[in-house]
Image: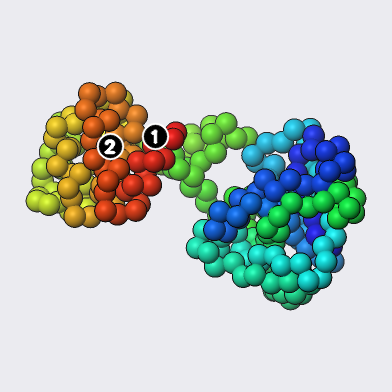
């Protein structure tokens, strides 16, 4: 028996036709994320609080589903998904593997297909307070309030940002100061110094494109990638042409950054 957490608005459709393969799994596969039903009620519904952070329609429900013991599924921590490190097991073995773990928080089971209505056992309301948020061990840690980690519009986000301001939140130094830092970094330049300067340039709407253009040929791919993100919101003429050149960069991270900027 497995449990899948979804919006309550999806419950009528799930009872009628099952669960669509809307989840994104390892290697770009589409399917359904779920977790085994364990003796611990809290562990079984551990994903509820984390999924609630992203909103729902009418609250959340827990969909209990039955799979054949020989059904192939992907098993692993959610962090293993990006590294293609999740393991393919049969459903029965997946339950045994997770149940035997000393700490199964953060683990998931991915069914690489849709779930039929006949496999849905029942749909019930999900508990609102079970599980973890952000990370399985986040409770008690000092939260990071940088632009990449903080939750915009989340409950208490403004008070948290005021109480724990992040040193990289700004305001950015003047352009003259940033250009002096870039020049002082040398040729080709210290990557750490250049990436910090590009971080501040990324907070602006316009900037000295001609002075930063040589960084597109910097030997460190991290500098070139940060250059892409720094230019992402600029309205300075010539940005599109520079991004066109970076779209042909030999490093995949730089090319992917250009794609993300253009898709966003």
By what rule are the colours in the image chosen? Answer: rainbow
Circle 1 crowding by C-alpha within 10 Å: few under 14, some 14–19, many from 20: few
| Identity of the residue drawn at 23% across and 40% down | 245
Whole-percent x, y for residue 95 in the image: 77, 70
User: As drawn, is 102 to the left or to the right of 92?
Assistant: left
Res 241 label: none
Q: Is residue 219 above or below residue 104?
A: above
User: As drawn, is 38 to the left or to the right of 192?
Assistant: right
**Which of the pair 142/148 is nearer the observer?**
148
Quarter of the N terminus within the rendering: bottom right
Report the residue marked by disc 2: 243
Whole-percent x, y for residue 179 in the image: 15, 36
Is the residue under label 2 in contact with that under label 1 (CB below 8 Å)? yes
**Which of the pair 189/70 is nearer the observer?**
70
Report the residue marked by disc 1: 262
| Identity of the residue drawn at 14% across and 32% down | 210
Q: Is residue 116 above or below residue 93?
A: above
Local SS, label 2: helix
Whole-percent x, y for residue 74 in the image: 66, 65
Circle 2 crowding by C-alpha within 10 Å: few under 14, some 14–19, many from 20: many
């Amino acid at each position: 028996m497995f449990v899948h957490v979804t919006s309550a608005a999806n419950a009528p459709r799930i009872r009628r036709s099952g669960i669509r393969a809307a989840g994104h799994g390892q290697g770009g596969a589409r399917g359904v994320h779920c977790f085994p039903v364990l003796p611990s009620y809290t562990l079984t519904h551990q994903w509820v609080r984390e999924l609630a952070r992203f909103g729902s329609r009418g609250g959340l429900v827990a969909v209990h589903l039955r799979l054949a013991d020989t059904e192939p599924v992907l098993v692993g921590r959610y962090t293993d998904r990006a590294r293609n490190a999740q393991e393919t097991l049969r459903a029965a073995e997946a339950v045994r593997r997770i149940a035997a773990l000393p700490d199964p928080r953060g683990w998931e089971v991915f069914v690489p297909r849709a779930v039929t209505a006949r496999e849905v056992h029942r749909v019930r309301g999900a508990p609102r307070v079970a599980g973890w948020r952000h990370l399985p061990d986040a409770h008690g840690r000092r939260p990071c309030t940088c632009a990449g980690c903080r939750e915009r519009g989340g409950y208490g986000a403004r008070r948290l940002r005021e109480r724990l301001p992040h040193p990289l939140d700004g305001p950015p130094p003047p352009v003259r100061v940033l250009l002096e830092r870039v020049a002082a970094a040398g040729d080709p330049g210290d990557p750490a110094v250049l990436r910090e300067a590009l971080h501040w340039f990324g907070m602006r709407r316009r900037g000295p494109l001609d002075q930063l253009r040589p960084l597109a040929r910097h030997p460190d791919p991290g500098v070139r990638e940060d250059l892409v993100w720094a230019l992402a919101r600029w309205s300075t003429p010539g940005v599109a042409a520079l991004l066109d050149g970076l779209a042909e960069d030999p490093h995949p991270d730089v090319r992917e950054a250009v794609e993300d900027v253009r898709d966003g």
